[in-house]
Image (spheres, helix red, strand yellow):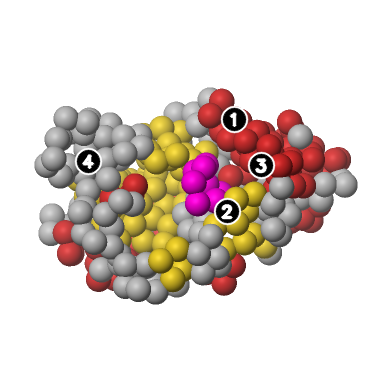
Amino acid sequence: MVSKNEVDLSQLHDAWNLQNPEAYAAWRRSKLAMSARAGGVPVVPVGDLSQPTESEKNAILEQVSESNFAIYQATRFSGDEIEVGAELRRFTDAFGLRVAEAHRSAGQNGVVALKVSMAEHQRGFIPYSRKAMNWHTDGYYNSKADTIRAFVLHCVRQADIGGQSQIIDNEIAYIRLRDESLEAVALLMDPQAMTIPESPEADGSVRPVSIGPVFFIEDGKLIMRYTARTRSISWKNEATKKAAALLQELLEAERDYLHTLTLQPGQGILNNNTLHSRTAFDPDAGTGASQRMLYRIRFHNRL
């Protein structure tokens, strides 16, 4: 018998087969039964961010196994920004997340500081502004070889107003779409479903075009590559574009498994690159930069 926190791997593989509705139905029941509903994700306390205990790690991994993300709160962490980054890297090392993305904005330990910035290589990009960010998975513009499969988002300083993080498990999004339209799922699993065109970088290099599916299966796991943006993106055809629009509608309508939180200092989200968005923050900051700062490290391997 499969317990609440275990998944029958053979059932999981068959669940992704669009021609096997019985396996999908069985997996769907199991997934919805084990997934935390809105507001139901416990915050896992971590005594020392740089040295999580086995029980703390197990609690986080159990939550990830249910919802593909976990929220933690470090009760002891450095007040020095550089040292916090080092502690965060030791924290992710403890989970085997040692393959960090080489991001253009990464500083020491592969940490990217998400804050309001007018630096040349960040100016004009929404993550470094106070604007809202729509639904996406990280690295949706990357090549297949550089797929982002996990990341950590850690709060150093919160916004005065706004800046909420919203999360929907990728597998819940898949369920919502498959329940609504099997054809839409098939269209978004097409290897040429979504194209992100090449883009010039501040250093003069060019990020190459990225073509791939929205949903794909890897080692029996559902991986998602998605953005709700409407500019600098194209869909394979009109039918695929409509399928993407349907997915966006379902994400906007989700309530039962929508998780919303305002991260506090020492608090973070460790996850298998789940769907997430961000509300706008500090609307009255004027031309001054908000103090909000989150640290992010992205990885090519999963939890």
Which of the marked residues, 3 or 2, is nearer the chain's N terminus? Answer: 2
Q: Which mark is residue 249?
A: 1
Residue under label 2:
225
Q: What is the spatial separation of the Cα atoms under label 2 and label 1, in whole angstroms? A: 17 Å
Residue 247 lies, in percent from the top left, at 63, 36
Q: What is the spatial separation of the Cα atoms under label 3 and label 2, in whole angstroms? A: 15 Å
For residue 213, side relative to residue 136 (left or right): right
Which of the marked residues, 4 or 1, is nearer the chain's N terminus? Answer: 4
Which of the marked residues, 3 or 4, is nearer the chain's N terminus? Answer: 4
From the image, give the main secondary structure of the stretch colored magenta.
loop
User: How dense is the environment of label 3, judged by Cα within 10 Å: few (below 14), some, or many (20 and up)?
Assistant: some
**Residue 222 shown in magenta:** yes
Residue 191 lies, in percent from the top left, at 71, 59
Q: Indicate which label's residue lies in the foreground, 3 or 2.
A: 3
Residue under label 3:
241
Which three-letter amino acid code belongs to the residue tagged 4? Gln
Helix or strand or loop: what does disc 3 sit on?
A: helix
Which three-letter amino acid code belongs to the residue tagged 1? Glu
Helix or strand or loop: what does disc 4 sit on?
A: loop
Q: What is the spatial separation of the Cα atoms under label 1 and label 3, in whole angstroms? A: 12 Å
Residue under label 4:
158
Residue 262 seen = no
